[in-house]
Image (spheres, rainbow, N blue to C red):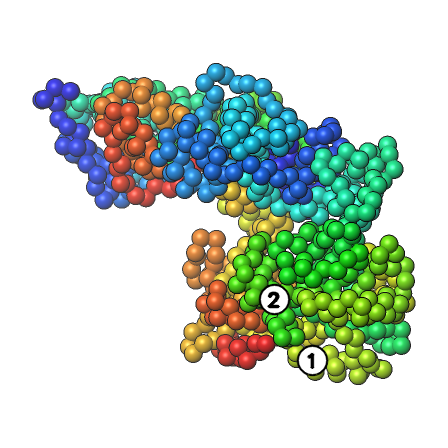
Amino acid sequence: MNRFAALLDALLFTPSRNGKLRLMREYFAAAPDPERGWALAALTGELVFDEAKPNQVRALAAARVDPELLGWSYDFVGDLAETVSLIWPAAPGGEGHVPSLSEIVEQLKGASRSEVPALLEPWLDALDATGRWALLKLVTRELRIGVSARLAKTALAEWSGVELDRIEEIWHGLAPPYQPLFDWLEGRRPPPEIGNLPTFTPLMLAQPLEDADIAGLDPHDYLAEWKWDGIRVQLVARGAERRLYSRSGDDIGGAFPDIWAAMPGDVTLDGELLVIRNGEVAPFNDLQQRLNRKTPTPKLLRDFPAAVRLYDILREGPEDRRGLSFADRRRRLEAWYAREPRTALDLSPMVPFTSWDELAELRDGARQRGIEGLMLKRADSLYVSGRPKGPWFKWKRGALTLDTVLMYAQRGHGKRSSFYSDYTFGAWRGDELVPVGKAYSGFTDEELRRLDLWVRNNTVRRWGPVREVSPQIVLEVAFDSVHRSTRHKSGVAMRFPRIHRIRWDKPFHEADRLETLERMMT
Amino acid sequence: MSPSVPQPETWIKTTPAGLYCEPGGFHIDPLLPVQRAIVTHGHSDHARPGNERVLATPGTITIMQSRYGELAGGSLQPLDYGEPIAIDGVGVRLIPAGHVLGSAQVVLDYRGARVVVSGDYKRRADPTCASFEPCNCDLFITEATFGLPVFRHPPDRIEIDKLLHSLSLFPDRCHVVGVYALGKCQRVLALLRRAGYEEPIYLHGALIGLTELYESLGVPLGPVLPWADATREALKGRIVLAPPAATTDRWSRRLPDPLVAMASGWMRVRQRAKARGVELPLVISDHADWDELTATIDEVAAEEVWVTHGREEALVYFASKKGYRARALALTGFEEDE
């Protein structure tokens, strides 16, 4: 357990992605089986002990430590696993046997709810504070060490030299502790046979298209369709099994029983998850309501009906269609949908055009809700995982922009920890500025240095880590759309705000008003 | 205590300027300038400038003079550890507190009653200062910076080894360690030397004066160099000590690929370390941890315990439960930093 605990501890404190990857690679190289398999499961969020609950941890601690002192400590530390790991008193009979991660997992997996505390207690006695912390993080299922499932798999790919896509393709056919996977990655066995399982196919992604690049492309080579403002998903059905995967390969089907019910048999489809009411796409915020809930209430399902707008077909019955051209796949998708219409599924319509100018006009004219821009796909493009350059482009509608005033700044993280790089900006409402958003990208390193210095020299007040600056700098902010929001004082929330230009020249009282932003709401 | 012995609250008072001994007419670590001050140690929230007369250990007086120059006090009276004097009928002695060089507890004897003011203190050995001496008393006025049972400082050696291990793991990264200028800086230097680290250690400008002062008072700290004299290239794989605020601020940009460490008792709590942008937390503290705070209360065998600056409520609760008369002393102006 000590090795795994040291890994979690190091991952928590290492800010950089490369540093985290290195730590995981070294761990996979050093740890034995099945320990590293269990660790991989923990890192990818696949290790779940249904019978272990935070309340059991709290009760164990309260039996060993004065409850008042435990309460004050918890108030100070703010995290149950960490509080208990730090406050846990030395064992009365000295230290016992330090369990391995494998022992812990194997025993917890087989334990009933009433047996869990009796397992945890001697482990807490035997482990040191870092070991206790790691154990309790596992039990309470909240690692929060800044590692996504995808990053863990990336480390696995880098360590083994096997491509990430190949790992992703079979991932959902595997189960912890992944012995066949490690055997394959270390060259001892052929790839695991995943058989007829509803696995995830890594998505094909598009390159952004700049307006200037378009002259080099022949409009006859491309087909166009709308780019919808939801989240990209993959529907997979095989036999009786159904999955709804997010673009990172997480199964989010549990939160979308309405999609689930509509899922057809034996097919893999690519599409956009949206909230659609009476055929009209709702703002992204509405979809967010659904994404926030792991188990939706009947009311939520009624008020925020989800649907998938289909883009592509990757598999039909036993046939892999990825080797066909996009034009062929599209015809098959349409034919398939004609045979299998479903209420919570519809087809993303194609956008016919003959010239780029015509298409640009269509794009800019499309003020319809839920459209982010256009997708351009070469008619002859095969479905290739990853983000190949050339076959697919996303051509986003020109962003909305607003001239705002810089109000607060905060320092960033990692390489930016010494720079005031997170900016809160506001718009005028009457004579006062109200914050309308926060951005931390879109500027060059040189501009960042200049802004950082300016913030330091123009701070009027400090609120903990936040500096309030005198309202002087106009930031032209670009954003994709703006929505009503009850969370913000201004009543609006921007989607994807970023700094477009720093208007050193513009007087701050000429910045935009909140009403201007409100009129941009879709 | 016999009935003729005065209750402590009749002669030890809390005033806006801080703790006041009424019959002696002096304050201890006053927050505002006063006529007569006894200063426990040189940290700026305890030793403030501008008092008329100051009594402190020779070490603390040297530190105050170096920090404040003329403003250190109208008259400065050094008093060696253990040497008794009387101030208007109150017996006064300074005994080691083990916190930083020169740090003292104040022992007050008045009409058969004894009060000990701990100042800031720690119990474990520190090569840069004299060790804490427990002293039996009727009232113990204790600090409580780490007055919660989550604070248990590991042995120093484990933490120093973490730093040395990281250096071997990342030989190209400059390891910048956040340390307070007085005490922590010199202790970390001394601990590194004890662990066998003989390379030059680089210092941020703000740390040089006090480090030289320690050396001049006979505390050997090995080769130290001003950071500013080194090239960026030369700092790769080196240890640089700096004030905590500098480690993640502009100054740190001049270091090659800095790895930020921090030596502080607060590093025990991960989220606190994380929030300060620390990559390598080192739990090295100049304050007593929970076990030391509670054990010391038992050891000095006072009937009454007053708890000041820190997490008073938990320590008051603990002491009350063990049968001591305990209360929190509301003194403001002390900093959470160590």
Could you tell me the amino acid type at mark 2?
A: Pro
| Mark found first going from the N terminus, 1 or 2 | 2
Helix or strand or loop: what does disc 2 sit on?
loop
Q: Where in the figure is residue B117, as x and y percent of width and height?
A: 28, 29
Q: Nearer the viewer, residue B35 or A403?
A: A403
Asked whether residue A55 is in view, the answer is yes
**Quadrant location of the N terminus of chain B in the rendered image:** top left
Left or right, B188 with reference to A415: left
Residue at 47% x, 38% y is A55
**Quadrant location of the C terminus of chain B in the rendered image:** top left
Helix or strand or loop: what does disc 1 sit on?
loop
Number of other residues with Cα within 10 Å of mark 1, as a class: few under 14, some 14 to 19, many 20 or more: some
Number of other residues with Cα within 10 Å of mark 2, as a class: few under 14, some 14 to 19, many 20 or more: many
Residue at 89% x, 67% y is A328
**Residue A193 in which image quadrant:** top right
Marks 1 and 2 share the same chain: yes
Q: Pointer 2 indicates a residue of which chain?
A: A
Asked whether residue B43 is in view, the answer is no
- Residue matched to label 1: A366
Could you tell me the amino acid type at mark 1?
A: Ala
- Residue matched to label 2: A305
**Residue A229 in which image quadrant:** bottom right
Q: Nearer the viewer, residue A478 or A201?
A: A201
